[in-house]
Amino acid sequence: MGTSKGYIAPSTPSWRQAKREVSRYLSNPTETERKTLAAQYAKAMTTGGYTASQVAKAFAGVISFSSAIASRGYTAALHDIGRDDILSLGPQETLDTLISIFANAGSTIDDKIALDSISESFQVLQVIEPEDLKSINTSRLLREMICQFAKLKFAQLFDKQIRNKCPIVEEANRRIAEMQDYIYYTMGQKLTNDILGEINPNNIANEVIVRNTLEEGFRLMTIYYGE
């Protein structure tokens, strides 16, 4: 995913510390430094004034639509969101249109990250056409979207800093990918079935619940890394 040109990460104390950890990691890219950077990134995401409301709204929309397909069918689910016209589109065009609807056409930085998170989640979960969603557990879908978001948000925040400090493109790409893989894996480990099982499936599409779950994932990452 590309980042917004010229974007500067937030400047609260926790974010300034995260930027310092990026520099330390690039100077000494060990597993220990990778853990420390991931911990500080997670801490900044929970204490640095960031709000995931736009992303939570997008993810809640996907969950709600998926649940509607499973309970009442694809046609009814489309009717609920006022897009009966989508029935005439092919599978891929339909998915692209739906993702764009849920993510507000990627109109802001976080909308774009939400769009990419949903798109990549569908690829991982092998959602080829909308009706495939009815066979995917909503907790599993939410976990995947949150993991994708955590991975992509890191790149959006620190891509410019990493590339400025790594003039060799291949090295910069490698460092970004290493951190993204690490964050993705760890978020998935922390959002266990027990954690997700505490969510009432009848309310999982609620935007507040989705946001709280996302924030809990980052909080658990800081605990995992000993913060």
Image (cartoon, grey):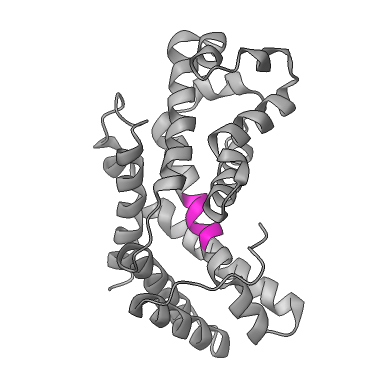
**The C terminus - image quarter:** bottom left
89 to 125, vertically: above or below: above
Q: Is residue 96 left or right of residue 190?
A: right
Front residue of 47/218: it is 47
Q: Position of residue 67 (x, y in %)?
A: 43, 21
Q: Up-down: is 185 above or below 88? A: below
Residue 158, picture quadrant:
bottom right
Residue at the (50%, 81%) spot, across then down: 22
Q: Quadrant of residue 120?
A: top right
In the image, residue 60 above or below residue 189:
above
At 55% from the left and 83% from the top, the residue drawn is 29
Residue 45 image offset from top left, x and y in percent: 38, 64
Q: Is residue 217 left or right of residue 185?
A: left
Rendered location of residue 170, percent (x, y): 75, 76
Of the 4 image quadrants, the one containing the N terminus is: bottom right
* Magenta extent: 147-153
- Measuring 69% from the left and 71% from the top, which residue is drawn there? 173
Out of 29 and 111, give the one closest to the viewer: 111
Whole-percent x, y for residue 19 in the image: 47, 80
